[in-house]
Image (cartoon, rainbow, N blue to C red):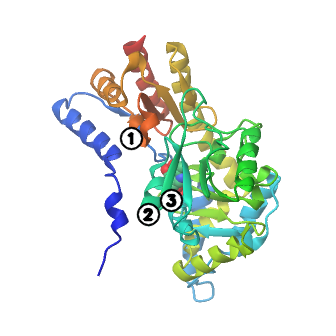
Amino acid sequence: MKINENYLNLKDGYLFATVAKKTKEYKEAHPEKDVIRLSIGDVTLPLVPAVIQAMHKAVDDMSKAETFKGYGPDFGYSFLVDAIINSYAKKGVSLSFHEVFVSDGAKSDCGNILDIFGGDNTVLVPDPVYPVYVDTNVMDGRKIIYANANAENGFLPMPDESVHADVIYLCSPNNPTGAAYSKEQLKVWIDYAIKHDAVILYDAAYEFFVTDETLARSIYQIEGAERCAIELCSLSKTAGFTGIRCGYTIVPDALTKNGVSLNKLWARRQSTKFNGVSYVTQMGAAAVFTDEGEAQIRESLAYYQENAKIIADCLDELGIWYTGGKNSPYIWLKCPNGMSSWEFFDYLLENANVVGTPGSGFGNNGEGFFRLTAFGSTQSTKEACNRIRNLLK
Ligand code: PLP
């Protein structure tokens, strides 16, 4: 018996564990202090009423033999798939029913999608990055190369024509940097992918935060994407589904490699290894796409956007360089006075009692940067910013 030795090459997931440990230690040593966490990557507002009502109804359906549901369709109930197709149509993107795959979230799909790619592909990942892209490829033993994101390119790296990649990860708006690609920039990536016969895995988990019309809400809004891109989407941040779990992945028909349809491979993978998302969850998810549900989730979005603006305004006032905060719940700032990410973490915790996330935990290029999030309460965000202002002005 042999284990998958690739797992031994994984780096310890120490980032959030260390943030939690240091915060706990500080609180224990200073129980009188009110520590504010602007490090939260999870949503904090509850599910909206339209979702709750739909889920209550779904539970009632499960209580009667006539409406009870057992195993559902592998790729999602038609009422949800149709709602997703309709939401894409509003963005000017036309999808066929079988191009949509409902799942239990973008994280699982990010990892699972690798099942349909050979192990000897070269994978291009931006640095800094959402760690799941790196770790899932390390588990499979794939070669990973990095695209440098830094202050010079606004944390939006563009393709290097002299470098070849087979699988490319793009996340826009980005976690952790909050930076978002323009449609023109995405077109350059699409052209590169087509030229290199590569596949783009486009993580659109934060697309709902995009308000600027020059930015894409789906990569399929850009010509050619259907021939080279798979889009991974999630209701986690859009509608507070982090605990409920629902997402969807789009694999277009036009995406083929050596005459093989990637849509067919993914359908085969999913129908073999996945038994669908619960009926109750999908009923709640479908409610997100109704007029009522959308109006309600827009209110939650506005709440987080207001928090992001409070943080961004504070940094503007202090003259601190940052990305994000406008089309994203994340604000990625340059640590003041040349501090390293962890130095700034300690400085902020000890002197302002505010917790953020050190950028170095997301990759080498994150050193010297720091992530704050808009997922807290407005009251605590304002208080944290007052403290940061007093400390750094
Ligand atoms: N993709 C990115 C970039 C994320 O930041 C996250 C969650 O934080 C996910 C995917 C995971 O989404 P889900 O909750 O749908 O698994």
Q: Which of 25 and 271 is in front in this view?
A: 271
Quadrant (top left/top right/bottom left/bottom right) for the C terminus: top left
Residue 44 percent across, percent down from the top left: 47, 45
Residue furthest front in the image:
162
- Per the image, label 1 sits on a secondary structure element best described as helix
Residue under numbered circle 1: 361
Q: Give amino acid for label 1.
A: Gly
- Label 2 C-beta lies within 8 Å of the nearest ligand 1 atom: no
- Label 3 C-beta lies within 8 Å of the nearest ligand 1 atom: yes
Which residue is depicted at the point 57% across and 42% down? 174
Number of other residues with Cα within 10 Å of mark 1, as a class: few under 14, some 14 to 19, many 20 or more = many
Residue under numbered circle 2: 141
Which label's residue is closer to the chain start, 1 or 3?
A: 3
Q: In this view, does 57 lie to the left or right of 332?
A: right
Instruction: Give the number of the mark in front: 2 or 1.
Output: 2
Residue under numbered circle 3: 107
Q: Do the residues labelled 3 and 2 touch (CB within 8 Å)?
A: no
Q: Give amino acid for label 2.
A: Gly
Q: Give amino acid for label 3.
A: Lys
Q: Which of 64 and 41 is in front in this view?
A: 41
Which label's residue is closer to the chain start, 3 or 2?
A: 3
Residue 250 percent across, percent down from the top left: 68, 64
